[in-house]
Image (spheres, grey):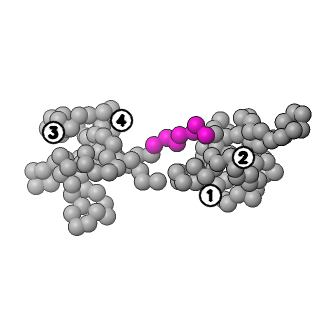
Amino acid sequence: MNSELIERLKDNKIHAIFDDLKPEANACLREVGFENCEWLTCSGDGDGLLWMQTEEGSFLPHLCYRIQANYQPKQEYVDLPVVSDMQWLGVKIPNRLPYPFVHLHCLPSLPYFANFCTPSGEYVNLADVATFMSEDKDILVRFRRDN
Protein backbone atom coordinates (compact mmCIF):
# COMPACT_ATOMS: atom_id res chain seq x y z
CA MET A 1 0.00 0.00 0.00
CA ASN A 2 1.16 3.50 -0.78
CA SER A 3 1.84 5.40 2.48
CA GLU A 4 1.27 8.80 0.82
CA LEU A 5 -2.16 7.68 -0.38
CA ILE A 6 -3.05 6.41 3.10
CA GLU A 7 -2.10 9.76 4.64
CA ARG A 8 -4.15 11.61 2.01
CA LEU A 9 -7.17 9.39 2.71
CA LYS A 10 -6.86 10.17 6.46
CA ASP A 11 -7.31 13.89 5.78
CA ASN A 12 -10.71 15.05 7.04
CA LYS A 13 -10.61 18.14 4.82
CA ILE A 14 -11.11 15.99 1.73
CA HIS A 15 -14.76 15.19 1.15
CA ALA A 16 -14.66 13.00 -1.93
CA ILE A 17 -17.51 10.67 -2.76
CA PHE A 18 -16.36 7.05 -3.03
CA ASP A 19 -17.27 6.75 -6.73
CA ASP A 20 -15.45 10.03 -7.50
CA LEU A 21 -12.16 8.78 -6.04
CA LYS A 22 -9.49 7.38 -8.33
CA PRO A 23 -9.46 3.57 -8.65
CA GLU A 24 -6.23 3.28 -6.61
CA ALA A 25 -7.87 5.24 -3.74
CA ASN A 26 -10.92 2.94 -3.85
CA ALA A 27 -8.61 -0.09 -3.79
CA CYS A 28 -6.67 1.38 -0.87
CA LEU A 29 -9.86 1.91 1.17
CA ARG A 30 -10.96 -1.66 0.46
CA GLU A 31 -7.55 -3.02 1.47
CA VAL A 32 -7.54 -0.98 4.69
CA GLY A 33 -10.98 -2.42 5.48
CA PHE A 34 -14.22 -1.17 7.01
CA GLU A 35 -12.98 -1.47 10.57
CA ASN A 36 -10.36 1.22 9.87
CA CYS A 37 -12.61 3.68 7.97
CA GLU A 38 -15.20 6.31 8.80
CA TRP A 39 -17.97 7.82 6.70
CA LEU A 40 -19.30 11.36 6.63
CA THR A 41 -22.88 11.96 7.77
CA CYS A 42 -25.14 14.74 9.02
CA SER A 43 -25.60 15.07 12.76
CA GLY A 44 -28.98 13.99 14.12
CA ASP A 45 -30.16 17.59 14.60
CA GLY A 46 -28.98 18.62 11.12
CA ASP A 47 -26.53 21.21 12.48
CA GLY A 48 -23.40 19.82 10.91
CA LEU A 49 -21.34 16.99 9.53
CA LEU A 50 -19.53 14.34 11.52
CA TRP A 51 -17.47 11.24 10.86
CA MET A 52 -18.93 7.90 11.97
CA GLN A 53 -17.30 4.47 12.27
CA THR A 54 -18.19 2.31 9.26
CA GLU A 55 -20.13 -0.87 9.78
CA GLU A 56 -19.71 -4.22 8.03
CA GLY A 57 -21.05 -4.27 4.53
CA SER A 58 -19.76 -2.64 1.39
CA PHE A 59 -18.59 0.82 0.49
CA LEU A 60 -21.55 2.73 -0.88
CA PRO A 61 -20.81 4.74 -4.02
CA HIS A 62 -22.62 7.92 -2.85
CA LEU A 63 -20.91 8.32 0.56
CA CYS A 64 -17.65 10.03 1.57
CA TYR A 65 -15.10 7.88 3.38
CA ARG A 66 -11.78 8.44 5.10
CA ILE A 67 -9.26 6.26 6.88
CA GLN A 68 -9.25 6.70 10.66
CA ALA A 69 -6.50 9.04 11.84
CA ASN A 70 -4.94 6.43 14.16
CA TYR A 71 -4.68 3.74 11.45
CA GLN A 72 -1.19 2.30 10.89
CA PRO A 73 -0.66 -0.10 7.98
CA LYS A 74 0.96 -3.45 8.64
CA GLN A 75 4.55 -3.50 7.53
CA GLU A 76 5.23 -5.59 4.44
CA TYR A 77 8.45 -7.57 4.18
CA VAL A 78 10.64 -9.29 1.63
CA ASP A 79 12.65 -12.28 2.83
CA LEU A 80 15.92 -13.30 1.15
CA PRO A 81 17.94 -16.39 2.08
CA VAL A 82 21.39 -16.17 3.66
CA VAL A 83 23.86 -17.89 1.31
CA SER A 84 27.52 -18.77 1.31
CA ASP A 85 29.62 -17.21 -1.45
CA MET A 86 33.33 -18.02 -1.52
CA GLN A 87 33.19 -18.89 2.21
CA TRP A 88 31.45 -15.61 3.10
CA LEU A 89 27.91 -15.48 4.45
CA GLY A 90 25.59 -12.87 3.03
CA VAL A 91 22.64 -12.17 0.79
CA LYS A 92 22.33 -11.76 -2.94
CA ILE A 93 20.13 -8.73 -3.50
CA PRO A 94 18.63 -8.55 -6.99
CA ASN A 95 19.22 -5.36 -9.02
CA ARG A 96 21.89 -4.09 -6.63
CA LEU A 97 24.81 -2.86 -8.66
CA PRO A 98 27.76 -3.10 -8.89
CA TYR A 99 27.85 -5.90 -6.27
CA PRO A 100 24.66 -7.90 -5.69
CA PHE A 101 26.26 -9.84 -2.76
CA VAL A 102 26.15 -8.10 0.63
CA HIS A 103 28.18 -9.54 3.50
CA LEU A 104 26.32 -10.61 6.62
CA HIS A 105 27.93 -8.02 8.91
CA CYS A 106 26.96 -5.19 6.51
CA LEU A 107 23.24 -6.06 6.30
CA PRO A 108 22.07 -4.27 9.50
CA SER A 109 23.33 -0.96 8.08
CA LEU A 110 21.06 -1.16 5.02
CA PRO A 111 18.10 1.24 5.23
CA TYR A 112 15.34 -1.37 4.79
CA PHE A 113 16.92 -4.11 6.94
CA ALA A 114 14.48 -5.46 9.54
CA ASN A 115 16.02 -8.60 11.08
CA PHE A 116 17.30 -12.14 10.63
CA CYS A 117 14.75 -14.92 11.01
CA THR A 118 13.92 -18.56 10.36
CA PRO A 119 11.44 -19.50 7.60
CA SER A 120 8.75 -19.71 10.31
CA GLY A 121 9.43 -16.07 11.22
CA GLU A 122 11.30 -16.71 14.48
CA TYR A 123 13.84 -13.96 15.25
CA VAL A 124 17.57 -14.88 15.06
CA ASN A 125 20.46 -12.80 16.45
CA LEU A 126 23.27 -11.86 14.06
CA ALA A 127 25.73 -13.70 16.31
CA ASP A 128 23.73 -16.94 15.89
CA VAL A 129 23.38 -16.89 12.10
CA ALA A 130 26.67 -18.76 11.42
CA THR A 131 25.74 -21.43 13.98
CA PHE A 132 22.34 -21.97 12.37
CA MET A 133 23.94 -22.17 8.93
CA SER A 134 26.54 -24.73 10.13
CA GLU A 135 23.63 -26.88 11.34
CA ASP A 136 22.08 -26.74 7.84
CA LYS A 137 19.19 -24.59 9.04
CA ASP A 138 17.78 -21.98 6.70
CA ILE A 139 18.12 -18.35 7.74
CA LEU A 140 16.38 -15.44 6.04
CA VAL A 141 17.13 -11.75 6.03
CA ARG A 142 13.96 -9.72 6.32
CA PHE A 143 13.75 -6.34 4.60
CA ARG A 144 10.92 -3.82 4.90
CA ARG A 145 9.25 -3.42 1.54
CA ASP A 146 9.71 0.03 0.07
CA ASN A 147 6.23 1.53 -0.24
User: Of the numbered discs in the image, which one, if any, rests on residue 130?
Assistant: 3
Where residue 39 sits: x, y (%)? 74, 42
| Circle 2 crowding by C-alpha within 10 Å: few under 14, some 14–19, many from 20 | many
Q: Mark 1 points at which residue?
A: 24
Name the front one of labels 2 and 3. 2
The Cα atoms of the two marked residues, 2 and 4, are separated by 35 Å
Judged from the image, the secondary structure of the residue bearing numbered disc 1 is helix
Name the front one of labels 4 and 1. 1
Q: Residue shown at 30%/33% (left/top)? A: 123
**Type of secondary structure dominating the magenta stretch:** loop
Q: Residue shown at 80%/41% (left/top)? A: 49
User: Of the numbered discs in the image, which one, if any, rests on residue 65?
Assistant: 2
- Mark with earlier residue (4, 1): 1
| Circle 3 crowding by C-alpha within 10 Å: few under 14, some 14–19, many from 20 | some
- Mark with earlier residue (2, 3): 2
Q: Give the range drawn in magenta.
A: 69-75
- Image quarter for residue 75? top left
Q: Residue furthest left?
A: 87
The Cα atoms of the two marked residues, 3 and 4, are separated by 17 Å
Q: Is residue 134 magenta?
A: no
